[in-house]
Image (tube, coloured by chain):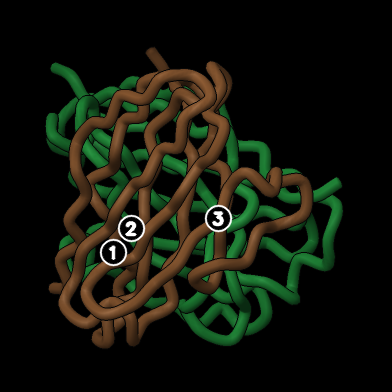
Amino acid sequence: QVQLVQSEAEVKKPGASVKVACRTSGYPFINFGISWVRQAPGQGLEWMGWISAYDGDRHFAQNFQGRVSLTTDTSTNTSYMELKNLRSDDSAVYYCARGRSGAPTGWFDPWGQGTLVTVSS
Amino acid sequence: SYVLTQTPSLSVAPGQTATITCGGDNIGGKSVHWYQHKPGQAPRLVVYDDLVRPSGIPGRISASNSGNTATLSISAVEAGDEAAYFCQVWDLSGPAEFGGGTILTVL
């Protein structure tokens, strides 16, 4: 079955970077895109960006422009999200989710299990 | 940005129907997708493209979208339906937008 399995929880200091992995299986990786979504404690879902696994095309939410990097590794069917210059309000659960390939549209299905990132001095 | 408005919480007795709304300016002109999110779990797609249920989602769940309101209905509510429900669309300028979520409590 289609699965997205994310890397383990991370604890980082302010100003550091974090890189979260999303390993996929059960479908042709390059036929889809991956979006990244986060949820801070007590908050709703916030879309961060999307990457096409086919050609690496990327779109980002304005809030994260310049601070987030999205990459894919087609040899391991894995997508990565790196968030730089971390602040305390970046503490959240970060999710990857499968989406369309050609453009950042449509629905997200399925989702990874989430990766808790805690930013604390 | 495009704003989606959801009622924060809703309580329903078992066996009754839960109606969850998602308001947005002319949301009827957009495709709306709905997710169920239980604590500690990954969000789960329950409806896409306004009214289509993915495989495995029970027929008790239905949805519609018109005018300024999209609606998710869950009939014959049971304890396992307790969760937060989020609506989602894509803004014209690109970003995906989520509603604030409705926490459904089964009494």
Q: Which residue is mark 3?
A: B62
Q: Do discs 3 and 2 share a chain?
A: no
Residue pointed to by mark 1: B97
| Quarter where residue B10 is shown | top left
Q: Can you give x and y, in whole percent of width and height, for residue A119 in the image?
A: 22, 25
Chain designation of label 1: B
In the picture, measured across the screen, residue A84 lies left or right of residue A10, that is left
Viewer-nearest residue: B10 or A119: B10
- Residue at position x 36%, y 56% from top? B87
In the rendered structure, which amino acid carries the disc numbered 1?
A: Glu
Real-space CA distance between mark 3 and mark 2, rounded to the nearest whole angstrom: 25 Å
Q: For mark 3, give the secondary structure.
A: strand
Q: Which chain is brown?
A: B
- Residue A42 in view (yes/no): yes
Which chain does the residue under circle 2 lie in? A
Q: Are marks 3 and 1 in contact (CB under 8 Å)?
A: no
User: In front: A21, or A33?
Assistant: A33
Q: Position of residue A35 (x, y in %)?
A: 48, 61
Q: Quadrant of the C terminus of chain B?
A: top left
Q: Is residue B18 left or right of residue B47?
A: left
Q: Secondary structure at mark 2?
A: strand
Task: Give the mark, 3 or 1, whose residue is nearer the N terminus.
Answer: 3
Q: Is residue B44 above or below residue A113?
A: below
Q: Residue at x 53, y 17 (%)?
A: B79
Residue A23 seen by the camera: no
Chain identifier, green in the render: A
- The residue singled out by tag 2 in the image is A47
- Disc 2 marks a residue whose amino acid type is Trp
Specify the amino acid type for callout 3: Ser
Pointers 1 and 2 in contact (CB under 8 A)?
yes
